[in-house]
Image (cartoon, rainbow, N blue to C red):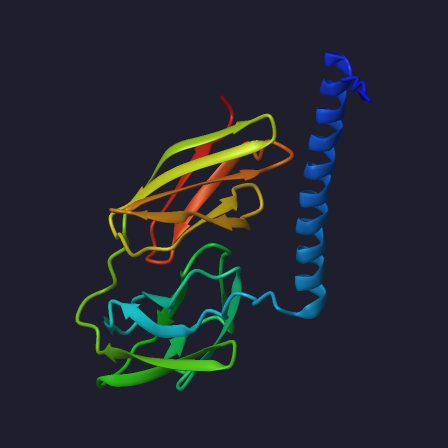
């Protein structure tokens, strides 16, 4: 007895192959989703380690009373953004902010330090704390022999366009902290990013044209420039 085997037409076989391929891909996709969901629910996904505060330092570390300095807090790795609290052992001589912020994606942040006149060398300790870890640094304040000398600030670009404000500036002190202020009201807007070599820059969304901005340094220098083309 002869059995007649009828092969499906080529178009039918092609359709079967496409359906089989789609089924296989769907199975792989479901497997991936299932594994991901199980990991999220089962707690097997390990969160990234918390950055560890490594140091707090000052430039200059020895300063004449009445002159400023710049403090820096550093982490061992980049943060997702961190608030570092600061404690001052002698606020009658040295002034620091109560806290400083390290921006997301950065491993360090700077904060301004001001000092008062002293009659003898005085060592002041600053303690920084973040994520349960504390570090200390010292600043030595000595008697001044001359008035403090300000740095020279130059604004190389101040441009507002379609809701975006771009500022570039320089300072003769590469360790300066440059803040951008609205000239009309002298109100703080934001700090520029120190990109090294005495150069600073930043760009921020800004709804209205500020017309004029003033860049001020914690070392005393400042400059003003129009943001109108």
Identify the residue shown where x is 42% and y is 45%: 215
Q: Quadrant where the N terminus lies?
A: top right
Q: x and y percent of residue 182 in the render?
A: 54, 43
Q: x and y percent of residue 101 in the render?
A: 50, 63
Q: Image check: 127 left or right of 198?
A: right
Foreground residue, 187 or 60? 60
Compared to residue 54, the image places residue 7 above or below, namely above
Foreground residue, 15 or 218? 15
Q: Hey, which quadrant is residue 136 in on the image?
A: bottom left
Q: Hey, which quadrant is residue 58 in on the image?
A: bottom left
Identify the residue shown where x is 40% and y is 31%: 157
Q: x and y percent of residue 34 in the render?
A: 72, 55
Compared to residue 56, the image places residue 185 above or below, namely above
Q: Image check: 60 left or right of 107?
A: left
Work out which residue is located at the far front of the displayed protein and give it.
Answer: 1
Compared to residue 45, the image places residue 1 above or below, namely above
Identify the residue shown where x is 72% and y is 32%: 20
Foreground residue, 89 or 205? 205
Q: Is residue 94 visible?
A: yes
Q: Is residue 153 visible?
A: no
The count of marks equals 0
Q: Hey, which quadrant is residue 115 in on the image?
A: bottom left
Q: Image check: 135 left or right of 123?
A: right
Q: x and y percent of residue 137 in the render?
A: 32, 79
């Amino acid at each position: 007895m002869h059995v007649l085997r009828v092969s499906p037409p080529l178009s039918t076989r092609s359709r079967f192959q496409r359906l089989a391929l789609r089924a296989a891909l769907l199975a792989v996709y479901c497997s991936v989703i299932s594994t991901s969901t199980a990991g999220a629910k089962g707690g097997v996904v390990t969160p990234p380690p918390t950055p560890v505060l490594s140091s707090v330092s000052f430039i200059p570390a020895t300063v004449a009373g009445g002159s400023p300095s710049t403090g820096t807090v550093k982490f061992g790795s980049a943060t997702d953004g961190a608030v570092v609290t600061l404690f001052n052992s002698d606020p009658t001589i040295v002034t620091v902010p109560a806290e400083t912020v390290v921006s997301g994606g950065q491993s360090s942040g700077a904060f301004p330090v001001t000092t008062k006149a002293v009659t003898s060398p005085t060592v002041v300790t600053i303690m920084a704390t973040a994520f349960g870890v504390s570090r200390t640094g010292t600043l030595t304040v000595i008697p001044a022999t001359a008035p403090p000398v300000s740095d020279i600030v130059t604004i190389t670009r101040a441009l507002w366009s379609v809701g975006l404000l771009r500022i570039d500036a320089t300072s003769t002190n590469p360790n300066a902290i440059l803040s951008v202020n609205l000239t009309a009201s002298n109100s703080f807007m934001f700090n520029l990013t120190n990109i090294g070599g005495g150069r600073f820059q930043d760009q921020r969304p800004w709804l209205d044209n500020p017309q004029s901005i003033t860049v001020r340094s914690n070392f005393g220098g400042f400059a003003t420039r129009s943001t109108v083309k």
